[in-house]
Every structure is written in structure tokens, then in C-alpha cells.
Image (cartoon, rainbow, N blue to C red):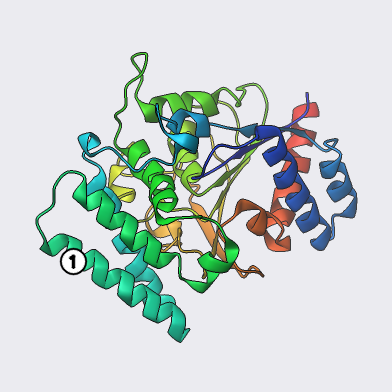
Amino acid sequence: MRSALVFIHGIGGLRDPEAERGSWLEALAGGARRAGHSFEGSALEQNRFTDTAFAYYGDLFVRPNAQGGTRPPDAALGEDEALRQLLEEMIDTQLLACSGEEERRVLQHAHAELTATRQQAQGSGQLVRRLVNVCTTLLALPGIRRGGQWASGRIMVGHLAQVTRYLARAEVDGGRTLDERIRDRVLGFLKEDRPTVVIAHSLGSVVALEALHEHRGPIPLLVTLGSPIAMRTVVHPRLRPQPPATPDCVRRWLNYWDRDDVIAPRPWLERDVLPNTVGCTPESDRVDSDGIWVHTATKYLAQASVAGPIVEAIRLAGESASA
């Protein structure tokens, strides 16, 4: 039996899982070649190196009358304030890290808008509308503007709200909450009788952390990319179980972050995640991606420092599975 590789995506609109799997594999193959693994790079592109799957759950965020799942959060869920806190932590952290004058000006403007939302009485839908305005301002950031990640502030709010919707532990369907249905979907791609390398991006790292606590199969390597796990105001205190710890099935955890990644403002996960029973804790490392928008999974996977350890772990897992 061969080892397996499972990709877990983050926030965003509807996707074609097969197309996404292909683009993630292509990026990983390029990174493998840069790391000196030319044979493995070619084998990855041809899907001959290991069995791969793209654990897609984006469709579960789509609500009735919402195109592409981009509708801002319903006030009835009570998560509009959590979304405000999420934006506040993102903006405050980027203000500390930014060096460009244009970037600082945009962030300060967005921060002032966000501060005003706290000082004014809010109706249930009024806060969401103001958060859309804040995100519209953030779209003027050079990286986001030129990267074209979001076409409008409304779409950006809808995508960021996926984080707070997951952590709300609400939206029951068929007796299962949204977060449970998402974890069920991901766990369906993991087999207990085969070693699996898991690569989780953005919100997918939160999903992976919680799902792997329910998994009993061997995970020789967990890789998290652009993870918001350590965001203190919204994410970290809502994770389950508490206090957050490395799942027992994980033997090694590598966490990568980019200084210009606005979604991963607190990158040092080892400071906020306890070791598992075998002493495994996250190992965080910074990467510097080229280009405008650095948060995408493919930007991370194309890095030699990211792809190299992944390829080596897949090879070792394959040898273990065939022994």
C-alpha cells in the first residue's frame, strides 16, 4: 500500500477540486525541483509519486440565495462582532510590520473606520455593512489590489467570515453543525491504515488541527501554510480541544508563514500549541515569496524550503507503508 498526500484548503469561493489538486501538485513539484528533487518533482506532476487528494469543503459554506458562498454573515449567528475582532487583529499586526508609506496610510484609514464601529450604536446588520466598508478600504492595499484576490469588500467579508462561521459551532444541518460537517468531509479523505502527509492552508489548518484529534491513523507530517491558529482574539481561544495541542497521530508538524501574509499575523505556533504525547510541537519557519499576493497555498508550496521536507516525508512514509 502506498502512502497518501491530502491537501486541505482555506477560505474562498467555490472551487473545482480536481483543478485545485492539479495546481497544488504543480506548485509542489516546482518547489521539489528547486529543492533538488527533480525525479520526485516529475513524479508529483504525473501523480505517480503518491496517492493525492484535495479535501474540498467549500460548498458547505454556501447558503440559500448566496452566490458562491460570498454573502456576509447573518446577524442571527452572533458572529459579526467576532469578524470585527478578526479584522482588528489583522490590521493591528500589519501596522506593526508594514514598511511602505502607501500600505501604512491604507491600514491607518481602515483602523480608523474599524474603531468608529465600536464607538457607534449598531443595529444587527449595520455592523456588517460597516465591516464591508473596512474591507473595501483594505482592497486598496498594494498587495491585495494588484493580486486581485477579491473583487469587492463584500466578497472579502464573506470569505473572512468563513473563519468565524466555522468557529461559531452553529448552522445545524442533519443534526450536525457546520464545523462538524466540515471535519467529517476532511476525515473522509484520511485512512487509518495508511501513513498520510497532510498539507493544510489558512482556515484549513484550523480544520486539520481539530479533525486530526479524531483521527487514529499515522500522520508522519502535518504542514500548515499561512495559518491563523494563533490569532489571540478570535481563533486560538475557540479551538477544540482546549488548551490547543498537537494531535497524537502527528509525528512532525512544520508551520510556514510569510511576513507579507495578512492572514497569518501570529506565526509562531509553538508558542501557543502544546506538545502531544510523543512530544511533537509545531516548528515554524518564515518564507519570502515573490509576487503580489503571498497568501495562496501555491505560493508556499513552490518554495524549496517547504517542498523539500514534504517530498522527503512522502518518500519515507511510502517506504514504511511497503515494509
* Position of 69 relative to 118 (above/below): above
Question: What residue type is disc 1 on?
Answer: Ala
Q: Residue furthest top?
A: 174
The quarter of the image holding the N terminus is top right
Q: Which residue lies at the image location 54% right of the left edge and 39% below the top edge? A: 250
Q: Which residue lies at the image location 65% right of the left edge and 59% below the top edge? A: 299
Q: Which residue lies at the image location 50% right of the left edge and 47% below the top edge? A: 280
Is residue 37 visible in the rendered image? The answer is yes
* Position of 50 relative to 128 (above/below): above
Q: Nearer the viewer, residue 24 or 305?
A: 24
Quadrant of res 30: bottom right
Q: Which residue lies at the image location 20% right of the left edge and 50% below the top edge? A: 126
Is residue 233 visible in the rendered image? The answer is no
Horizontal and vertical percent position of residue 35? 79, 61
Q: Nearer the viewer, residue 55 or 130?
A: 130
Tell me if 82 is positioned left or right of 317 in this view.
Answer: left
Q: Residue furthest left?
A: 121
**Label 1 belongs to which residue?**
116
The quarter of the image holding the C terminus is top right
Horizontal and vertical percent position of residue 62? 44, 31
* Position of 94 relative to 162 (above/below): below
Horizontal and vertical percent position of residue 18? 71, 33
Tell me if 159 is positioned left or right of 285 in this view.
Answer: left
Q: Nearer the viewer, residue 174 or 313?
A: 174
Q: Residues within 10 Å of mark 1 (few under 14, many from 20)?
A: few
Tell me if 278 is positioned left or right of 37 in this view.
Answer: left
Horizontal and vertical percent position of residue 315? 78, 42
Total count of labels: 1
Tell me if 244 is positioned left or right of 77 in this view.
Answer: right
Quadrant of res 19: top right
Find numbered disc 1 in the image and state the secondary structure of the residue it sits on: helix
